[in-house]
Image: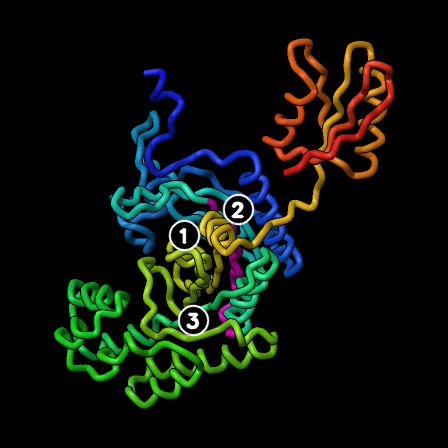
Amino acid sequence: MKERLIHTPEGVRDIYAAECARKNLLSERMKNVLKSYGYRDIQTPTFEFFDIFNQDKGSLPSKQMYKFFDREGNTLVLRPDITPSIARAVSKYFSDEQFSMRFSYTGNIFINNSSLQGRMKESTQMGAELIGDDSIDADAEMIALAINMLLAAGLKEFQIDIGHVGFFKGLVAETGMDEEKTQKLRELIENKNFFGVEAMTDNRALIQLPKLFGSQEILDKAKQLTSNTEALAAIARLERLYQIIGEYGLEKYVTFDLGMLTQYDYYTGVIFRGYTYGTGDAVVKGGRYDTLLRKFGKDAASVGVVVMVDDLLIAMSRQKLSIDEGESLQMILYGSGQLSDALKKARELRDQGCLVQLNRIEYDHQLEDYKAYAKRFGIEKIHYFTPSGSITLLEVQP
């Protein structure tokens, strides 16, 4: 029993010491980008009523949520997604606001993934929502945010794939497929199963859809495959979007994937994902959701972006991209009767912007023991008060 108490359940883990410091620094860098774009913080509860995330809202299937009951018998869930929570909060507190609003957030989500998938069941997200703006300019701002957040994190090689759910929806509407067949087709396209798609439909554009990814020339090719009004409108929006991203000077990070689909049904327009080396999953996700807030009582077009912080951290580690903490943790090591002098030295160092911890020398430990301790916990320098009262500066080798 004692052995079980020190272990975490499957799908969650402890983050501590240097890794925790890197994660916090990574988050701080990206948050500064959000602040520079005028996004203001918002926090929503870790658990909410089940109805906030049910299938009607287009979130995850019920079986992937952690559900429990309160004293009154209401079904609650640990949030599997933060966007619906923000949609609910904004609809409640800003129901009469007519101008656009910008919110940013950081929080953990909880998804009951299958153990066979090897994915964590708790993960940290950082994101932004631009609410009340249906323009292409807003779509471009979200993608610019995604790119600049990754650059601020220190990532050097990545790409943002952009798609549009309207292209797929327009093509499927022509076929008359029911919901079950549409879902099957969606899975085949998402998995780039060319033969499976061809077996389900003779629609030329749908058959080619898994292959429609690459540079902006793909958009020209897509226009030749269909005359569907909704599909063509989606392509026209992507073309204009690419022009605006060019005005940001960020077009080199962008490619297109018209076969990109999503498990979140609340997306209505442009969608995008960011990929880099070192992880098979997207480190950035986002898109336009113009009808979600309507389900909570406020009719406001919206677009958002989210960075998967843990996946990004893993990718950067595998790419051997260091996240320099930029802060020097130091130790003051003092003996009996030296506390007053140690406190004076600590104030001096802290006034210089240093991070300082004080440790009193215990009689059963040697100086070498403290050096080893400092090495384990990333302490770079030791200010050692010798028995005579002088201070010796010891550099700790990493």
Residue depicted at x 30% and y 45%: 113
Please report the bounds of the magenta region as a residue range: 124-136
Residue depicted at x 15% and y 81%: 202
Q: Which class describes the residues within 10 Å of circle 2: few (<14), some (14-19), or many (20+)?
A: many
Q: Amino acid at mark 3?
A: Ile
Q: Position of residue 98 (x, y in %)?
A: 56, 62
Looking at this view, is 60 or 281 the one in front? 281
Q: Main secondary structure of the magenta part?
A: strand
| Disc on res. 106 | 2
Q: Secondary structure at mark 2?
A: strand
> Which of the two labelled residues, at mark 1 and mark 2, occupies the earlier sequence position?
2
Q: Nearer the viewer, mark 1 or mark 3?
A: 3
Which residue is identified by label 3?
Answer: 162
Q: Is residue 39 above or below residue 169?
A: above
Q: Position of residue 12 (x, y in %)?
A: 39, 36
CB of mark 3 within 8 Å of CB of mark 2? no
Q: Position of residue 111 (x, y in %)?
A: 34, 44
Q: Amino acid at mark 2?
A: Thr
CA gap, disc 3 to disc 2?
Answer: 24 Å
Which residue is identified by label 1?
Answer: 296
